[in-house]
Image (cartoon, rainbow, N blue to C red):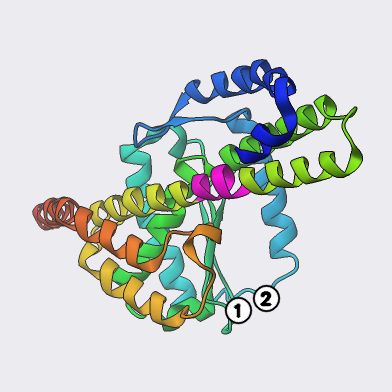
Amino acid sequence: MQAYDTGVGPNRHALLPVIGILLAFASCQTTPTGRKQLNFYSLSHEMRIGAQTWEETLSEVPLIENGNNAEMISRIGQAIAKTARKKHPDPAKKFSWEFVLIEDPDTINAWALPGGKCAVYSGLLTVANDEDSLAVIMGHEVAHALLRHGGERLSQGLMFQGALITADKTLERRNPEDRHKIMLALGLGGVLGILLPYSRTHETEADELGLLLSAAAGFDPRAAVPLWERMAKASEGSTPTFLSTHPSAKDRIRRLQAITPKALAVWQRATVQNDDSKP
């Protein structure tokens, strides 16, 4: 904000109509959690992007396609996807859900693409060392897909780029050195003040919805806090929260502790229902 006060002057008002129009799109969609979402992409477009990226990525990495771990990844993922189709049929029923295990013992990670394409790295299994813990992670990834975070992130990037282009245009008559400083400040401010916080919001949203989904699928949500305590230990010395796309481990654990009682009630109901359905 200081960059505006010391350099742009009246030109800053030229940005307001453009930003206002872009922000109007933010109310066009609502996530399954009730949050208003900016997303310029249709679901079919997102799914095409996800399918293409999926094929390209899997052609470049080694997969573990057989054995107990591969079977476990598929089974847990499909159980959570089945729950997602029941609780959030739009868009879950439109997705072609896939879950794979990538052979990479040095990488503690998992990710999801639009359309229900989810991958887990084998290194994650050393931290998510039981099925309930793994279900917490996979529920999180399923939630990212359901919440359409991929399309939202692309849309945020487009809006941010458009705003920077407009700002640069309004400053074209300014001294080149001043123009460069202002644009640098705007770019840094946008990343730290808009894009990174939105990404942390996505992570928190996926944590909460994912825990409820995995609990409804029959996996004990009490595994979540110990899992993230182990994850925090495994990632000691990582990027500070304000520069990270993820919440700090402390914040994540605190939020999961708050939602665990609700998830526990969901899990207990699911357990009773499963028992009642047995012959």
Location of residue 131 (image quadrant): bottom left
Above or below 98: residue 178? above
Task: Point out the residue furthest to the front here.
Answer: 6
User: Which residue is rendered at x = 12% and y = 56% of the image?
Assistant: 268
In this rendering, does residue 119 appear at all? no
Give how far across and how far down residue 30 sits, in percent.
42, 28
- Read off the residue under disc 2: 62
> Which numbered dot is residue 103?
1
Residues at discs 2 and 1 in contact (Cβ within 8 Å): yes
Q: Residue at x 73, y 36 (%)?
A: 161
Residue 40 on image: x %, y %: 62, 27
Q: Nearer the viewer, residue 8 or 82?
A: 8
Circle 1 crowding by C-alpha within 10 Å: few under 14, some 14–19, many from 20: some
Q: Amino acid at mark 1?
A: Glu
Q: Nearer the viewer, residue 154 or 267?
A: 154
What residue span does the magenta drawing correspond to? 191-199
Which secondary structure lies at badge 1?
Answer: loop
Estimate the x, y position of residue 191 in percent, counting from the top left: 62, 48
Q: Work out whether residue 148 or residue 59 is closer to the camera in this orientation and state it.
A: 148
Reply above or below: 107 against 174: below
From the image, which quarter does the N terminus lie in? top right
* Left or right placement of residue 204 versus residue 192 in this view: left
Badge 2 or badge 1: first in the primary sequence: 2
